[in-house]
Image (cartoon, helix red, strand yellow):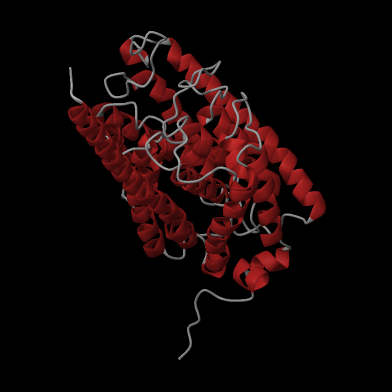
């Protein structure tokens, strides 16, 4: 039997070990939070900003930047609580409203080794970038006031409920918290990419085409900016996916590797398809393919081995290229920066393939009442998970379509959505903000 001194030493050692783990996990999560914020500004701002015409560069970048401020305030007041408070199947409650009781103590329902405030600010960065992705569909033609109102309503009606359903305690789609329809979404395939991508398509159809589209060439004004933005997105995505392990763990490493492999394979897949189709591989094709791979691997990153990650990325490169080049041309919609073709299509593909390649060899978090690790996807012999993933995708699509359409009608009837023809021809930089991105004077 251990003496009191030995017992005290063991207790002290356990406390020191726990403190060291908490410090390491917290450091990684704070870095991941910064990486995900970097994806919006400057990453997405540069990526989208370079793809529009010169007269719209500031207006487009501002649509990403302003959400870093607007969504932060909404999140602090009520957003975090609606997404992660309570245990309802569809939406949270007001338990954490105004960040009540969100401090240095961990929330053991979500991340037991880091302060809840760290978890809160990490999830905030996802809420910021998601509506920013939508702006790629209505680039160069939406009023700034309309965009602001749309974003506020969209986060409340679409994002917060979807985040709770997939990641929240008791959520309808939360496989790890008793969800009725257990879906796997490690870092946001449904929550972020399907909702934003499908909403983007609804916005593009509702607003209509830009003046002169498609007869007038509307080439990117600076692929250099977009190239830099895409590289920042690639690096930031490690915080997005590996950070979703919520700890500096082996699972974070696995997600990190899968993320990189998926992006690399997709870049090559898109370039190969483009090279075969057009005779030349383009810089725009390469960076678009990389982003498509990052999108598709997002839901699967914490569930799949490296070579399935390569396969998911390769499929995403081919599929998203087809959606952007063939499907968009066939139906003639003006998704300005291909938000739907990359995020909506890539997110859906990735979510479905997660049901195929998810394996308990990577993620042992799903257990039965006796504590036994359960199989995850088709490769584990659980083919029914593919059906669960399809149902989860359908719910995300339905919420995005219906919610976005209602919000667009409200915004259009109140502040208006589309700029005038004269303002669009002049450019959003001057007409919306009274300034220019480039002044070429001696």
Relative to 201, is 441 above or below?
A: below
Q: Quadrant of residue 226?
A: bottom left
Residue furthest front as drawn: 4
Q: Nearer the viewer, residue 313 or 414?
A: 414
Residue furthest bottom as drawn: 442
At 17% from the left and 17% from the top, the residue drawn is 1
Q: Position of residue 83 (x, y in %)?
A: 58, 36
Quarter containing the C terminus: bottom left
Q: Nearer the viewer, residue 195 or 210?
A: 195
Q: Quadrant of residue 163?
A: top right
Can you see residue 83? yes
Q: Position of residue 234 (x, y in %)?
A: 34, 49
Can you see residue 159? no
Q: Nearer the viewer, residue 41 or 59?
A: 41
Q: Is residue 321 left or right of residue 130?
A: left
Q: Quadrant of residue 283?
A: bottom left
Q: Position of residue 77 (x, y in %)?
A: 64, 49
Q: Position of residue 153 (x, y in %)?
A: 69, 45
Q: Is residue 427 left or right of residue 133?
A: right
Relative to 366, is 261 above or below?
A: below
Relative to 221, is 314 above or below?
A: above
At 48% from the left and 37% from the top, the residue drawn is 323
* Number of numbered labels in the structure image: 0
Q: Is residue 63 left or right of residue 386?
A: right
Q: Is residue 225 left or right of residue 337?
A: left
């Amino acid at each position: 039997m251990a003496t009191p001194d030995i017992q005290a030493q063991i207790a002290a050692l356990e406390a020191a070990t726990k403190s060291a783990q908490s410090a390491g996990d917290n450091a990684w999560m704070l870095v991941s939070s910064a990486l995900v914020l970097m994806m919006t500004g400057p990453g997405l701002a540069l990526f989208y900003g370079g793809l529009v015409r010169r007269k719209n560069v500031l207006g487009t970048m501002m649509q990403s930047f302003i959400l870093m401020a607007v969504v932060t305030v909404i999140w602090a007041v009520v957003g975090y609580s609606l997404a992660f408070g309570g245990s309802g199947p569809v939406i949270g409650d007001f338990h954490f409203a105004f960040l009540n009781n969100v401090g240095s103590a961990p929330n053991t329902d979500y991340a037991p080794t880091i302060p809840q405030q760290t978890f809160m600010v990490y999830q905030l960065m996802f809420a910021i970038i998601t509506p920013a992705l939508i702006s790629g569909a209505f680039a160069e033609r939406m009023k700034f006031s309309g965009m602001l109102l749309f974003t506020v309503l969209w986060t409340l009606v679409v994002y917060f409920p979807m985040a709770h359903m997939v990641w929240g305690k008791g959520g309808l789609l939360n496989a790890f918290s008793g969800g009725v329809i257990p879906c796997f979404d490690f870092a946001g395939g449904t929550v972020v990419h399907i909702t934003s991508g499908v909403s983007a398509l609804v916005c593009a159809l509702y607003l209509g085409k830009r003046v002169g589209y498609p007869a007038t060439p509307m080439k990117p004004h600076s692929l250099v900016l977009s190239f830099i933005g895409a590289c920042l997105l690639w690096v930031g995505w490690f915080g997005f996916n590996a950070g979703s392990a919520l700890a500096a763990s082996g699972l974070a490493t696995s997600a990190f590797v899968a993320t990189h492999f998926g992006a690399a394979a997709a870049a090559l897949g898109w370039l190969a398809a483009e090279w075969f189709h057009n005779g030349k591989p383009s810089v725009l094709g390469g960076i678009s393919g990389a982003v498509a791979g990052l999108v598709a691997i997002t839901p699967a990153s914490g569930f799949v081995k490296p070579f399935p990650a390569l396969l998911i990325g390769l499929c995403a490169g081919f599929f998203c290229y087809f959606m952007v080049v063939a499907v968009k041309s066939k139906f003639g919609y003006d998704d300005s920066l291909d938000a739907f073709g990359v995020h909506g299509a890539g997110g859906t593909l990735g979510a479905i393939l997660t049901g195929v390649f998810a394996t308990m060899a990577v993620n042992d978090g799903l257990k039965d009442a006796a504590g036994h690790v359960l199989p995850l996807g088709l490769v584990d012999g659980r083919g029914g998970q593919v059906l669960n993933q399809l149902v989860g995708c359908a719910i995300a699509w339905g919420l995005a379509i219906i919610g976005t359409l209602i919000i667009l009608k409200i915004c259009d009837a109140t502040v208006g959505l589309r700029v005038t023809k004269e303002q669009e021809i002049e450019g959003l930089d001057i007409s919306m903000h009274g300034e220019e991105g480039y002044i070429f004077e001696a």
